[in-house]
Amino acid sequence: MNILYRKIVKRLLDILLSGLVLLLFSWLYLILCVLVRVKLGSPVFFSQERPGFKGRIFRLYKFRTMTDARGADGELLPDEERLTRFGRLLRSTSLDELPEFFNILKGDMSFVGPRPLLVKYLPWYSEEEMRRHDVRPGLTGLAQVNGRNALNWEKRFAYDVHYVDHCSFLLDLKIAFMTVGKVIVRDGVLSGAEMVTTDFDIYRKEQLEHPDPERGNA
């Protein structure tokens, strides 16, 4: 039954539900497009390449949450200075993630799965961690409903691999309900920050340069 769900039913549900959301909430997308354009400028959408199923690269879309403000030297200001009050509202309510429903409809993503991270991280995964790409990346995932930013990278990836090994309709349903609860209380499930405290490539490089025998990475 799980094999049938993974290979056929999960994708059919993704198409049906994402299409329904895009149809029913087209008015909300239109309003947000106008607000983002007026308050933050153009382009309305932020896009970035991310690795998806089997590591294949796709372009992920979100509503932009930062301005293009620059300093006297012409360089972009730090992220925290370009993130406006409106941008924070989009992130805290997860509204910035709504364009990802187009990614789900296209087949780049699924509703539930490991979150798609940065392309630059690919060379730094262990063989076991790379298994997170054996399913489509998700709008939300097991790590996101189990503490995400409070987890170190190893624990996050352990949740991702656990999901790959135990993917089922019931698990997806559980994650979906937990996600809704966390979004309602603004618990940061889909706030747009895909890092813990340090970018994974820097984190792994420091591990390799300064191995800790107690962590088993010597």
Image (tube, rainbow, N blue to C red):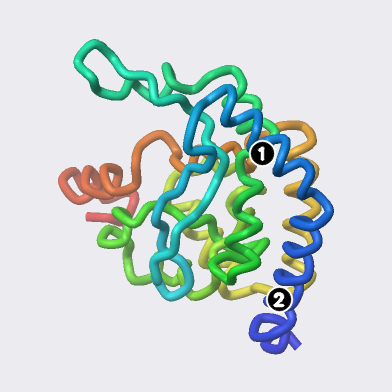
Above or below residue 68? Residue 49 is below
Q: Residues within 10 Å of mark 2 (few under 14, many from 20)?
A: many
The residue to which callout 2 is attached is: 10
Secondary element at image label 2: helix
Q: Residues within 10 Å of mark 1 (few under 14, many from 20)?
A: some
**Residue denoted by label 1:** 94
Q: Position of residue 151 (x, y in %)?
A: 51, 43
Q: List the single residue furthest toward the left.
A: 209
Residue type indicated by callout 1: Ser
Looking at the rendering, in which quadrant would you find the N terminus?
bottom right
- Which residue of the protein is positioned furthest toward the top in this rendering? 72
Q: Quadrant of residue 32?
A: top right
Of residue 15 and residue 55, the one placed in the foreground of this image is 15
User: Residue 218: horizontal and vertical position, in percent?
Assistant: 22, 55
Q: Nearer the viewer, residue 156 or 57?
A: 57
Secondary structure found at label 1: loop
Q: Position of residue 207 (x, y in %)?
A: 25, 47
Q: Is residue 158 left or right of residue 165?
A: left
**Left or right: where does residue 92 sit relative to residue 25?**
left
The residue located at (60%, 67%) in the rendering is 163
Query: At x 43% / y 75%, what residue is drawn?
Result: 54
Does residue 131 appear left or right of residue 77 in this picture? right
List x then y, in percent, for residue 56: 40, 71
21 w.r.t. 192: above or below: below
The amino acid at mark 2 is: Lys
Q: Considering depth in this image, is 158 or 91 the residue closer to the camera?
A: 91
Q: Residue at x 59, y 24 (%)?
A: 38
- Quarter residue 197 falls in: top left
Which of pointers 2 and 1 lies earlier in the amino acid sequence? 2
